[in-house]
Image (cartoon, rainbow, N blue to C red):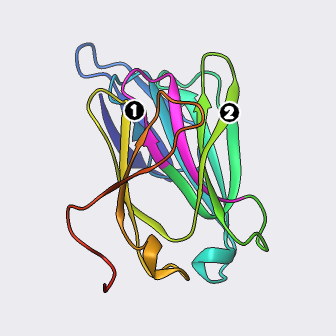
Amino acid sequence: MVVDLEDGQTIVERLRNGARWVIPNGGRPVSFSPDGRRVAWSVVYGLAKFDLRRTVTWLADADERRARMIAARFGGGIVSLMLDAMGLLVGGRRSPHAATAELTLFDLVHESERALLFYERLRGTAVSPSRRWLVYFVIQASDPAQNRTFALDLSQSPGAPQRLDLFPLARR
């Protein structure tokens, strides 16, 4: 499948048969799940600093069905669509005044969500090909000891982040 923006609309085209359809998202860029079955996009509201902007995350089947709002966060948005298209990672604060942000895994099969971790200044996220591990780093945290690279086992509920000493992000 390919995506194009035409006349302010997001158009998806299935290359094998030329079928085309509109994703109902007002012409915003979309992220496809790795298996191509789902698309997600974010709508950002406000002109305030990043940490104060409200971002609403939407998800739909790639064939334009079942568009629905998944999450509303401040200073965050989509982190990753999972390989099997059954999960979506979203980060951000639930309110503009929350001290820490939350990384949430949305189970799209059971229509449920699970908080994975709370963080301050999470960056550089990557999900392993098996979709079991999330690697990320924290920078400029108020506690310099938190400025590190971590791995989180997504199969554990709740999991404890494991510190990785790939490269130090804080002075010792």
Residue 84 lies within the magenta run = yes
- Residue 52, how many percent across, how many down? 69, 76
- Horizontal arrangement in the rendering, residue 12 relative to residue 46 (left or right): left
Displayed quadrant of residue 113: top right
- Counting from the top left corner in percent of width and height, residue 33 is at 39, 31
Compare residues 81 and 65 and report the one nearer the observer.
Answer: 81
**Discs 2/1, front:** 2
The residues colored magenta run: 79-93
The amino acid type of the residue labelled 2 equals Glu
Does 85 appear in magenta? yes
165 lies above or below 162: below
- At 60% from the left and 26% from the top, the residue drawn is 107
- Say which residue label 2 marks: 113
Q: Residues within 10 Å of mark 1 (few under 14, many from 20)?
A: many
Q: As drawn, is 35 to the left or to the right of 107? A: left
Q: Residue at x 31, y 22 (%)?
A: 14
Q: CA distance from mark 2 to mark 1?
A: 28 Å
Q: SS for tag 2?
A: strand
> On the image, which quarter does residue 15 sit in?
top left
> In the rendered view of the protein, which quadrant contains the C terminus?
bottom left
Vertically, is 118 above or below 64? below
Q: Which residue corresponds to the image point at 23% horizontal and 15% vertical from the top-left? A: 16
Q: Main secondary structure of the magenta part?
A: strand
Q: Nearer the viewer, residue 164 or 122?
A: 164
User: Which residue in the protein does label 1 denote?
Assistant: 12
Q: Which quadrant would residue 18 be assigned to in this image? A: top left
- Figure check: 131 above or below 27: above
